[in-house]
Amino acid sequence: MKYSTQKYAPVAIAAVIFFVGYGALLWAQSAFHLVLLKTRTPLQQPLNDLPRTLGPFHMRGAWANEKLSSEVVQVLGTHHYLIRRYWYRPMSRSMPGAVVRLNINYYPTNFASPHVPNVCWEGAGLVLQKDSYLKLHNVPHADGKKGTLTLRFLSFAIPQSNVTGLPIAAAGNSGLYLNTAYVFQVDGKYVPNPAQVSELFWQKHSKYGYDAKIEVDVLGATSPKLARKQIARFFRAALPAIERCLPNWKKLNAPTPKIKKVSAK
């Protein structure tokens, strides 16, 4: 039986191109100390281990973490998530703004487009009314230091029907909205915009790469002023504990200590 070399020529050419390209990739990584294939970045502890009490905010015993359907998880792009409600105990639970919902989505590697209320809530039929930033000063971190944190702050019009599952109080009152804020931790740094996530993720010399969205929704219809106050209170109370769950970027990228050679006498 005779075989035509022309039949297998395209396959051979494709194989050569693949191996040449792969070799060039390995050479570039070695020569320029680039890391193009990121290692899966481990959490310091499971998100579910986040304390049920964070300063003045408390998760009641009757409350459970929200579980997403398999279809929603597939769209989300990660199984590492935490959605739970916290009550600000100095206020009655029935008061506007007394309960907030924390939503953390963690991507240990392979950057995925962040899912944000700008897209998800509008896709559910809500209408965005206000889009601004919330700058928080003197926010404590897990390492004991304090810094400035900038969040993306959004206010949506109260819908006629409760499409989000959020409890709506005093619907239709002037000046009340459904309010939320979020920020991303990307390779140890914080940014408030999805576009900035991809910019930070590909740090060329780092072995690791991850991103996490931290979102806080103020449940019920509230004024943006009250919502900002409650979100600021929650971040100041919760961020150190959240950071103790997320990766310790400095530790992961710390230089390997050199072993001193002991000369034989």
Image (cartoon, rainbow, N blue to C red):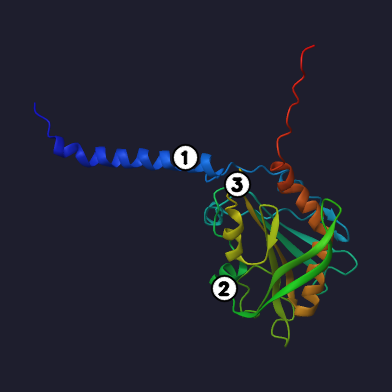
> Quick one: label 2 or label 1, which is nearer the N terminus?
1
Task: Measure the C-alpha gap from mark 2 to mark 1.
Answer: 45 Å
In this picture, is 155 found above or below 173? above
Which numbered marker is on residue 122? 2
Q: In which quarter of the image is residue 192?
A: bottom right
In this picture, is 224 found above or below 115? below
Q: Which residue lies furthest to the front in this view?
A: 265
Residue type at mark 1 is: Trp
Q: Tell me residue 188's x, y (percent).
A: 70, 53
Towards the viewer: 17 or 151: 17
Towards the viewer: 100 or 232: 232
Task: Measure the C-alpha gap from mark 1 to mark 3.
Answer: 14 Å
Residue plotted at (56% across, 44% down): 38
Residue type at mark 3 is: His
**Under tag 2, what secondary structure?**
helix
The answer to whether the residues at label 1 and label 3 have Cβ atoms under 8 Å apart is: no
Viewer-side label of 2, 1 = 1
In this picture, is 58 found above or below 40? below
Residue wearing tag 3 = 205
Q: Quadrant of residue 25?
A: top left
Residue plotted at (91% across, 67% down): 90
Q: Residue furthest right?
A: 90
Which numbered marker is on residue 27? 1
Viewer-side label of 3, 2 = 3
Residue plotted at (69% across, 75% down): 178
Residue type at mark 2 is: Glu
Task: Measure the C-alpha gap from mark 3 to mark 2.
Answer: 37 Å
Q: Quadrant of the C terminus?
A: top right
> Quick one: label 1 or label 3, which is nearer the N terminus?
1
Towards the viewer: 10 or 98: 10
Towards the viewer: 36 or 168: 36
